[in-house]
Amino acid sequence: MLEKLVINGGKPLNGRVRVSSAKNAVLPIIAATMLASTPSRLVEVPHLEDVHTICEVISALGVKVTKDEANQEIRFDASEITATEAPYELVRRMRASFLVMGPLLARRREARISLPGGCAIGSRPIDLHLKAFEALGATIEMGDGYVLASAPEGLKGNQIYLDFPSVGATENVIMAASMAEGKTIIENAAEEPEIVDLVTYLNSMGADIRGAGTNVIRIQGVKELKGATHTVIPDRIEAGTYLIAAAMAGGDVYVENALSEHLKPVVAKLKEAGVTVQEDVDGIRVISDGNVKAVDIKTLPYPGFPTDMQAQFMAFTTIAKGTSTVMETVFENRFMHVDELKKMGAQIRIEERRAIVDGVPKLKGTEVRATDLRAGAALVCAGLAAEGVTKVTQLSHIDRGYDNLVGKLKGLGADIVRVDE
Ligand code: UD1
């Protein structure tokens, strides 16, 4: 059986859609529940495969996870952390599993985690995490596709400069340092809203962390953290995806719960392309007749244009009048959606880290593959605007990060179904 999304495109979208809580905030926050000696509760948790995976990871480490699916609540009891090894099977499925390293070091002074992606790509994608843990006094050993971090005497606060403002490394260090002895200062820290949300949660547990949302974060270690109840921020990438869908398909859509404060570059670029975007305190309204003009974007760490919106925005430029350029600076190889968009008639060429897109009047429906999460979202947006029928395969990628995508789009009048063929 092969599951597919079947989209009968070319219909405008109209109505309201509500954004769920942010995947990229809820994942580190679930990892952080491991730090508390008393139970925590998260409310309005989105139904996502990645949430399921991180819950499996922390369960394997001894956290008792109780899900109340009907009420979108999860309770966590991390009074005992019984294991220090994150299973390969789970880390392989989701890179963010690595976020348990900081909490494990804090609670158990040891962590053994398989390398995401295995030996072939080596330690590079986690080098910043490891360097920072070393600065906090941990010893790092590599071998056998695993990395073992240990700090038998406990972690000690230090001054840490990140060579790149990595989101995951910033989060991992914050969690580790929250219970370290003394003071830690992270310089060139990532400034993403998801980091601010993690710190809000940690501080409500009794942590002493200042400066989240700026590039210098100061953490005074505390001896113990207590469980807390937390509601996670809205997902700016999910919100941005619905803005793009409406801008491409045309129509009048209100994206409820979207925080315009977190979406400035996406909103600015849509406006520059000629889309009407109205922001208020409860959400963002987008009005489009599908007639849009070319714009250039360049991905950057927050507050720059988010790399997680690059694929969707590229889909948008494929039908924008004129030539757009899309420059990816955060990830080395994040253009896998280009070949799929080309199957739909898009005119794109790649020159190193830049994609040059010549807008065409219409995309044409065909069968395409979701090569990763946001690539999948981009193809759904493209399919909604295309002539004819688009079939999107490899839905497991999309399920990682979009809660009820089909239901939400249907609510806007889209002709989309999920089928088993
Ligand atoms: C997080 C997001 C992801 C988003 C990314 C960038 C989560 C769960 N995921 O991923 O959706 O696309 O931020 O906004 O929040 N790097 C290194 N060494 C390291 C760490 C990172 O070289 O030790 C590189 C990466 O290979 C990449 C860049 O830094 O090229 C950005 O990575 P990072 O900010 O760490 O992304 P993640 O936290 O993995």
Image: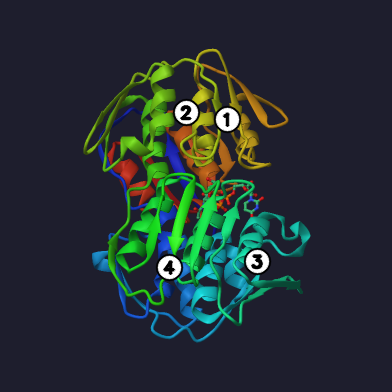
Q: Is residue 377 left or right of residue 41?
A: right
**Foreground: disc 4 or disc 2:** 4
How far apart are the two marked residues, 4 and 3, measured between alpha carbons? Answer: 20 Å
Which sits earlier in the primary sequence, circle 4 or circle 1?
Answer: 4
Amino acid marked by disc 4:
Ala
Q: Which mark is residue 134?
A: 3
**Foreground: disc 4 or disc 1:** 4
Q: Nearer the viewer, residue 1 or 399?
A: 399
* Residue count near mark 2 (Cα–Cα under 10 Å), binned few <14, some 14–19, many ≥20: many
Q: Nearer the viewer, residue 111 or 289?
A: 111
Label 4 sits on residue:
32
Label 2 sits on residue:
386
Q: Is mark 2 within 8 Å of ligand 1?
A: no
Q: Are marks 2 and 3 in contact (CB under 8 Å)?
A: no
* Residue count near mark 3 (Cα–Cα under 10 Å), binned few <14, some 14–19, many ≥20: some
* Residue count near mark 1 (Cα–Cα under 10 Å), binned few <14, some 14–19, many ≥20: many
How far apart are the two marked residues, 4 and 2, measured between alpha carbons? Answer: 42 Å
> In the figure, 1 relative to 235: above or below?
below
Q: Quadrant of residue 78?
A: bottom left
> In the figure, 278 relative to 111: above or below?
above
How far apart are the two marked residues, 2 and 3, measured between alpha carbons? Answer: 51 Å
Say if residue 247 shows up in the picture: yes
Q: Are marks 2 and 1 in contact (CB under 8 Å)?
A: yes
How far apart are the two marked residues, 4 and 1, measured between alpha carbons? Answer: 42 Å
Amino acid marked by disc 2:
Ala
Amino acid marked by disc 3:
Glu
- Look at 32% across and 51% down and name the residue there: 233
Which sits earlier in the primary sequence, circle 2 or circle 3?
Answer: 3
